[in-house]
Each structure stands twice: as C-alpha cells, then as structure tokens.
Image (cartoon, rainbow, N blue to C red):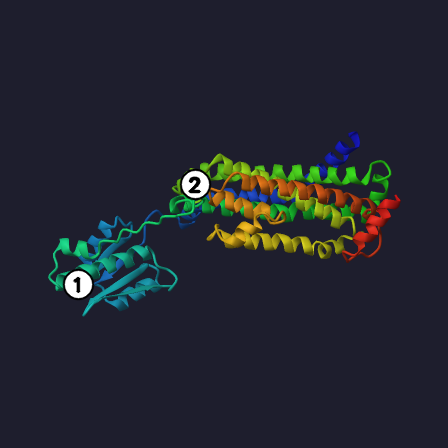
Amino acid sequence: MHSFWIIFKQAFWTKAKTKSFIITTLVVCAAFFLLANLPKILDAFQGSDEKPVLYIVDESGELAPRLQQQLELMESDLQTKPTDKSESELKDGIAAETIDAYVVLEQGEQLAARYVSKSANEMEGGSDLESAIQSLQTVLTAENLNLDATQVGQLFEPAVFEREAVSESSKSQEELSQARGLVYILIMLIYMSVIYYPNMIAMEVATEKSSRVMEILISSVSPVKHMFAKIAGIGTLGILQMLMFGLSGYMAIKTAGTSMTEGVFSVFGFSEVKISTFLFAVLFFLLGYFLYAVLAALLGSLVSRTEDVQQLMLPMMFLIIVASFIAFSGISVPEAKFVTVASFIPFFTPLVMFLRVGMLDIPLWEPLLSIALMLLTIGLLGWFGARVYRGGVLMYGSSQSLKDIRKAITLGNKK
C-alpha cells in the first residue's frame, strides 16, 4: 500500500505543479471575477454616468408627449427629448458624436417610426422603444374606433394559459425553468471533466513509457497498482480543481455587488435547487471520471509515443460526444424515450441520467439502477483494463490500432 500512495502523490503533484495546470486554473478563476464585474468595468470605460438622450422628431407636436407617457408607464430608463431641429442638423450631430440617436414619428393610416443612429447595430433601449411605439399605435387605433379605456383593456386582455402534465415524473414549467440552467451548467462540467482528466492520464502513461521510466516503475510496483494510483491521483486533482472553479464562481457572483447576482442565481436555478441534485452531480462526476479514466489508462498503455495517444483515444471521445449530444438534446424533452433508454447505458449515464434526475421527478430506483450498472461496468472494465495495462506498459514501438489489446493481454499473462 505504501507504493500506491507514493505513485498517487507523484501523479497528483506532477500535474499540479505544471505551468499549464496552474495557468489554466488561474485564468478560469480570474475569468469568473471578470465576467461578474463586467458591468462595472464597462461603466468605468464609458467614463460618464449620463445616459444617452434619444431625440424625438414630431412635426405634429402631439405624438412625442404621448410616446414619453407610454415610456413612463413602462417605467423605462430611456431618456427622450422632443426637438425642433431638422434631420440634417441631427445627422450632423450624430456624425460629430454630440447626438447619439433620434426617432422620427409620423402618423398616417397608422403610426410610423424611423430610428436613426450612427450604426444599425446600436439601439439604446430598443425593446422599450418598440414596445412603447406599439402601445401608442394601439391607443391611437382605439381612439379612431371610438373605443373607451375599458374596451381597449378587454380587447387586449391576455388569455389564461396553463400547462398541466399527466406524467407523474414531470415537473411544472416553473420548476423546469429553474432546473434547466443548473442542469445545463453541471452537464457541461461533467462533459469537460470526463474529457480532460482521463486524457491527462493517457498522456501521463504514454509519457512515462516513451521516457522508459515505466520500466523502472513496474520493477518495484505491480502495473495494476500503478494504474489505479494514477487514476486516483489525477482524479483527486480534478476534484480539487473543480472545487476551486465552483468556489471562485460563487464568490465572484456574490461579491460583484451588481443587480446580476440575484438574476444569475434565479435564472440558473441555484436559489431553489435541491441538495439531492448537487449530490447526484458529484456522484455522476466521480463515476463518469473513473469509468472513462480506466478506459483512458487502458488505451494509454498501448502506445509508447505521445503522438499516438489522440488516435487511440478517438473511440472514447466518440462515446463522450454521443452522450453529450443526447443530454443536450434531451434538455428540451427530458421524458423522451431515447433519453430514458440512453440513461441506463453506462457510458452515457453520467450525463443523461443526471439530466433526468435534475429535470424530472423519477423513482429513486432508476438512478440507483443506473449507478449499479456503472459500478458493475467500472469493475469489469477495471478487471479487463488491468489485464491490458499489465502487458501494455511493456509494449514499445508504433501502436495505432485497438488490435494491440489482444497482444497486450497475451504479454501480460506471460509476465
């Protein structure tokens, strides 16, 4: 057991001290704080707290006050000001950057509005302006039809529309909206983890073989113990890095001091999420990691050059991509049959079953069954991987085919 912990610490600290790992961790953590404080940074670069003014050109003199009234009823922050300037003067002001934009109001058979700014992509308070103009058009039309305020209100009264699910596993639309963002983020984390860390294991094994360090290691410790020590060491490093990302993201949002804090937590469902969802996220992260880590160690033991690792990793990458495709497709239809079936396939379970757990109220036996199937698969793959690993670490030369698995098993049995 002493040799296991030596290799465990060696795998952990070797990767933890690399520049790529340190830089990646710092950059991602810094990115969270940058994104959380982005509104403050943008305001600082603007250098002024004054909001741009939208000038209103209205020859009739009646539409501008009514448009401003509609904006006030909407509680819009858009600053407007009627003007007597000609359009040529306003355009000169836009070119000189003394004026941001203006809107021209004209009333014919229906209200027409023309927005003018320096760039077609720029429209300060665009949605508020469009809504206010549409509301004004409704009021003007109602006046032409001699409708009173009560009749106008009845005409545009929205219909009562509710969603009711017959399935017992389905959640309400509000619950789905809260869960969808959280599930999406956690699926992304699991997806990136099962790609990044198992690939790190395969590269580590191939590097040790290419430098002939492997020959020294297996003379003092069994290849099987070496494999599982590598998996455990890099897995611990991965968990630590994910905790750092999660903590830095949480602290960045909490300390941002902007209105986005509550919005982020409510939109992505963090405010009312169940503890069981986080527990399942951690569990499926660990199971997914160990499943693909054993497979990566198996494949990494077959090559003696780091250049060949990516080619042999393609089958594993294909499985992860298919699993992610099913999971992301199932976010909108979590009760679909293909999602249910895929959730019990061990290589798809970490992503797809977690999707169902987060989005649906499924019976407890379903995730427990999928976890049992994953544990069984990990056990079988670990047993098979150990046999391949035992012989694979002794194989040298070009290796670019899965057919070398049989050769590795034969060589391992002779050892």
Residue at the spot 20% in from the left edge and 53% down from the top edge: 69
- Against 173, residue 10 (above or below) is above
Q: Looking at numbered disc 1 in the image, what kind of residue is underneath it? A: Thr
Q: Position of residue 330 (x, y in %)?
A: 50, 52
State which quarter of the image contains the C terminus: top right
Tag 2, which secondary structure?
helix
| Nearer to us in this view, 172 or 58 | 172
x then y, percent, for residue 52: 32, 54
Circle 2: residue type: Phe
Which image quadrant for residue 8? Answer: top right
Instruction: Residue 177: give x, y in percent of width and height.
Output: 41, 46
Q: Residue furthest top?
A: 2
The location of residue 193, given as percent across then percent down, is 61, 45
Residue at the disc numbered 1: 141
Task: Please report the residue visible at 25 percent of the width from the left and 56 percent of the height from the top.
Answer: 132
Secondary structure beneath dot 1 equals helix
Q: Nearer the viewer, residue 53 or 209?
A: 209
User: Mark 2 Cα within 10 Å, few/some/many (few <14, many 20+)?
Assistant: some
Q: Relative to 68, is 239 on the left or the right?
A: right
| Quadrant into which the N terminus falls | top right
The residue beneath circle 2 is: 265
Describe residue 14's horizontal placement relative to residue 222 as left or right: left
The mark nearer the N terminus, 2 or 1, is 1
Q: Is residue 1 left or right of residue 195?
A: right
